[in-house]
Image (spheres, grey):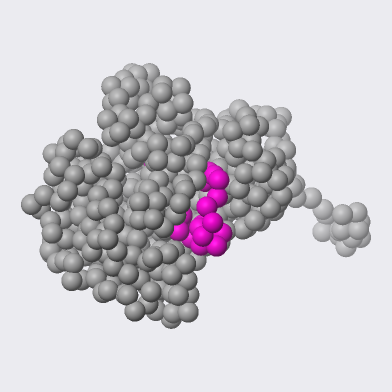
Amino acid sequence: MNLQLTRFVSATSYPALSQTGFVLCSRSRFLFGVSPITTTSTDVAYQAPISPDTTTTYGVDQVLTSCPESNTLLDICYDWDRVPVPSSLKEFEKRWSNRHTPIDYSGVWRFRELFPFAPEEKIVTIGEGQTKLQQANVAAKFAGINAGNLYLQYEGLNPSGSFKDNGMTAASTHANMVGAKVTACASTGNTSASLAIYASVTGLFRCVVFIGSGKIAYGKLSQALDYGAATIQIEGDFDDALLRVREVCEQENIYLCNSVNPFRLEGQKSIMYRVLESLQWEIPDWIVVPGGNLGNSSAFGKAFMELKQLGLIDRIPRLAVINAQGANTLYQLYEEGGLRWNDGRPDVVKSDTFYTDMDEQNRRASTLASAIEINRPVNLMKCLRALDVCDGVVREVNDEQILDAKATVGAGGLGCEPASGASLAGAKLLREEGVIAPSDRVVCILTGHQLKDPTATVGYHTFNAKDKENALVKRGITQAQFTNRPTPVPNDLEEILKVVRGL
Ligand code: F0G
């Protein structure tokens, strides 16, 4: 299973779009304090470690998940002086009239000048990113935020039903650029569904997905199976699966599609572009997002930092990352342990000690929000940077809070899976603490579709606290505030009518 590498990206690959209102701009070349391009690349896009102490950069033709020299995560960086970026975000609206062209139809690639790492002919798209920002007054009331000020960003409307497609279109594009024929990921379910759909729709590569046993919601497992992914169910959880898939990819030269792949996060930046677009390019006060492997939060921070440095926005919203209480590594390290980005030199002794203790005590992640049941978030350091850039906060919410928030989203809108409920539960908590004001404009990201985890939804609505066998009770949930129970009725018209008339 050899991957063929081809080097081809050069400045000339990118069409100048000045005639459509996009201009080649002259702006600060280097974001994040990353050092200038060294010998490795004269390309518009290149890979650079997030550590300010390493100056080596790598071409975008290389398949890397960390900097071989510093062992830190990699960013995709751009020589913005040579990129045709728009003079205003409003320019992107011109693409709306060109929806018959797949890359303009895509809610990700229609912003391609903001992550120009791929020549257009290599872009892999299946129509992702047709998602919706919806004003949500039922949710606003629940959270204690003024009517009209709370918005839900429904990323469950993507082709595979989760936000992952934003990133997978970018990773698939890069896989296509380097000629990868086999791809892989570890997953709590959504990444595997997303990778599987890109593999099956495009036929460009095969895919192998690693999942923990008993750790994946059926909606997601059914997708991977249906789309034809080779599915490896290992004994263990997501953290174990990710460790193994990284080893396997390394040894077998398989293209890894987890969010340690820096190209994936480039696509996930587009969630923020669409939020701004829906708000007619106004900046909200808060973005609230569930935190698992911390890819989204990292991507959002990078998006806002770049937009600000490019002069396309004048302020950055605050970021709230919400952990499930049973998988709260970020919360513990950031809020309780005081771990900070510290200009790219975080106190790694703190995180190393935390993980050593975790291993010694054999603490495993445990939450009903299985999508974010993760104890070792691979993007921790990038997330610290995002929290720094966005003046962020981290909170934890328990499964009961998550499920009540999820039911509220469902009752007032298009619904979401449990992990997504964490964002509304987190917004409510931050409002109660007075961190979010009732008049703040708040956007909660709903990361996955309601149908992903029907077991959790039906379990909630039929909740019975006395039933000791109940999965929710076993997880310490004592009540469900917003249940909508089915009514059992004999198969008899009169009996049925009695019930219907009493509604
Ligand atoms: N919400 C949902 C629905 C998810 O599937 C995930 C992650 C997250 C939130 C967390 O996002 O990692 O960017 O902080 N799911 C991964 C998976 C781990 O394998 O599907 P993050």
Residue 273 on the magenta span? yes
Task: Name the residue: 13% across, 44% down.
Answer: 56
| Residue 472 in sight | no
Total labels: the figure holds 0
Q: x, y percentage for residue 354?
A: 35, 22
Q: Residue furthest left?
A: 39
Q: Nearer the viewer, residue 378 or 336?
A: 336
Task: Name the residue: 23% across, 44% down.
Answer: 34
Q: x, y percentage for residue 348?
A: 28, 26
Picture quadrant of residue 216: top left
Q: Which residues are magenta?
A: 271-293
Q: x, y percentage for residue 119?
A: 24, 69
Residue 446 on the magenta span? no
Picture quadrant of residue 403: top right
Q: Nearer the viewer, residue 61 or 191?
A: 61
Task: Name the residue: 19% across, 44% down.
Answer: 35
Q: Nearer the viewer, residue 299 or 408?
A: 299
> Would residue 293 be found to the left or right of residue 462 on screen?
left
Image quadrant in which the N terminus is located: bottom left
Image quadrant in which the C terminus is located: bottom right
